[in-house]
Image (tube, rainbow, N blue to C red):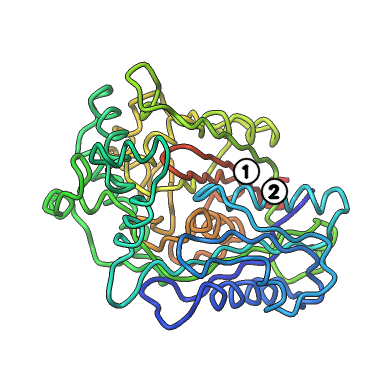
């Protein structure tokens, strides 16, 4: 069985003056030091470039002084990439194709003169093919497209803005206990409703942060990890799904996602059911995304996740603790590395004031594109394994 032995996170947020290569190099070195490994101990490197230029590429290995690697590639499934990388790394170390594999993401979409939203909007306007027709129809950003999904979901199931707001409020409560979270001021439901519209039905506080920075993990075998510094975080299951939903009235767009298939695969591999999962670290590019993913994973029925959020079940002290670091809504946005970082921290028992008492089993989701790419990991502690 493979395990995550090292965890590295740079300063994240409005951090300027560094390139993606700078952040990625720092993140990998931090992860290696966290594990108690040298750079010479790492024989695999998986690279997930972000959206900004110059984007990460294979030259990162040379910049890190890595030689004679047994595994080296760059890949992207956008926000699902972290789960894909960890699964590939686990397969590599389980098979003996590599001994220790670093998985890294870094991006610098923000600049002092423009917002991260501007960077992602510019990328959206470069659409080609069918997607360019969507742009011509007025879908000028990622948020426009997610607004369509959220609107269909809300109108179909009767989900309210109070329920979306409950997601933002609960995650801010977690973020208040996270010293590295960007947004730590108290947030009320009234504050949520007062935030400006971005694209109806999405308020500003329905939308994730945009951050500069880098994050990395080191995957190795359990046998090797037992001699290293950190508590073991076992990689018990993984799955992918890439449904590429069509924007048609007869499709399931907005109502269900690839999280259903990828979650089913990951849980089956781990030999677990949703009831066995103690923590949920869910990709929350929008409040809506968290709700539909919880439903797809089987924690409740279709359209019922909003009621869970409104009940306080996802918040500190709730029965279904979810996004315990504040998530991408309130902590930081490192694509799929955001939920993965918090999952590893919690399973290790190193989350400080926000540490959840029962933290032996956790599900981690990734979501990329417009509900087009999904990855799921199931991680467990040594005790659970």
| Left or right, residue 290 beside residue 222 | left
Q: Earlier in the sequence, mark 2 or mark 1?
A: 2
Quadrant in the picture for residue 159: top left
Which residue is depicted at the point 47% across and 30% down?
296
Tell me the quarter of the image containing the C terminus: top right
Q: Position of residue 215 (x, y in %)?
A: 55, 66
| Left or right, residue 292 beside residue 225 | left
* Residue closer to the observer: 376 or 70: 70
Q: Secondary structure at mark 1?
A: strand
Q: Which residue is mark 2?
A: 235
Q: Position of residue 288 (x, y in %)?
A: 32, 39
Quadrant in the picture for residue 320: top left
The crowding category of the residue bearing disc 2, from other C-alpha atoms within 10 Å (few below 14, some 14 to 19, many at least 20), is: many
Label pair 2/1, CB-CB below 8 angstroms: yes
Q: Secondary structure at mark 2?
A: strand
Which residue is depicted at the point 38% across and 62% down?
331
The CA distance from mark 2 to mark 1 is 6 Å
Does residue 273 sit above or below 228 in this rendering?
Answer: above
Q: Position of residue 112 (x, y in %)?
A: 30, 78
Q: Residue furthest right?
A: 96
Q: How many marks?
A: 2
Q: Residue furthest top?
A: 250
Which residue is depicted at the point 33% across and 36% down?
133
Q: Position of residue 81 (x, y in %)?
A: 57, 51
Q: Which residue is mark 1?
A: 378
* Residue closer to the observer: 131 or 79: 131
Which residue is depicted at the point 34% across and 53% down?
171
């Amino acid at each position: 069985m493979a395990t995550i032995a090292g965890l590295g996170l740079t300063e994240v947020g409005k951090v300027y003056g560094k390139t993606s290569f700078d952040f990625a190099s720092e993140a990998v070195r931090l992860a290696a030091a966290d594990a108690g490994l040298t750079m010479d101990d790492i024989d695999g490197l998986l690279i997930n470039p972000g959206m900004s230029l110059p984007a990460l590429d294979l030259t990162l290995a040379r910049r890190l002084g890595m030689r004679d690697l047994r595994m080296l590639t760059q890949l992207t499934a956008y926000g699902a990439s972290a789960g894909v990388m960890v699964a590939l790394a686990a397969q590599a170390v389980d098979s003996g194709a590599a001994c220790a594999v670093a998985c890294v993401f870094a991006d610098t979409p923000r600049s002092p003169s423009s917002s991260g939203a501007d960077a992602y909007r510019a990328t959206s306007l470069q659409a080609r093919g069918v997607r360019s027709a969507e742009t011509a129809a007025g879908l000028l950003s990622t948020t426009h497209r997610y607004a369509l999904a959220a609107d269909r979901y809300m109108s179909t199931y009767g989900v309210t803005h109070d329920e979306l707001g409950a997601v933002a409020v609960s995650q801010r409560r977690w973020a208040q206990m996270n010293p590295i979270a960007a947004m730590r001021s108290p947030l009320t439901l009234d504050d949520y409703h007062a935030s400006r519209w971005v694209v109806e039905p999405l308020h500003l506080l329905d939308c994730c942060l945009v951050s500069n920075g880098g994050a990395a993990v080191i995957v190795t075998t359990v046998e090797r990890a037992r001699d290293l510094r950190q508590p073991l975080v076992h990689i018990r299951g993984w799955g992918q799904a890439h449904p590429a939903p069509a924007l048609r009235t007869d499709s399931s767009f907005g109502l269900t996602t690839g999280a259903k298939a990828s979650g089913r695969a990951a849980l089956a591999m781990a030999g677990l059911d949703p009831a066995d999962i103690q923590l949920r670290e869910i990709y929350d590019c929008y409040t809506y995304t968290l709700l539909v993913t919880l439903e797809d994973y089987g924690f409740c029925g279709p359209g019922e996740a909003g009621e869970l959020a409104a009940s306080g079940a996802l918040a500190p002290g709730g029965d279904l603790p979810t996004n315990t670091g504040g998530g991408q809504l309130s902590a930081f946005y490192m694509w799929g590395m955001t939920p993965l970082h918090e999952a590893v921290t919690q399973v290790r028992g190193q989350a400080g004031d926000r540490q959840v008492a029962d933290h032996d089993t956790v599900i981690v989701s990734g979501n990329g594109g417009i509900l087009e790419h999904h990855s799921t990991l199931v991680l467990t502690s040594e005790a659970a394994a």
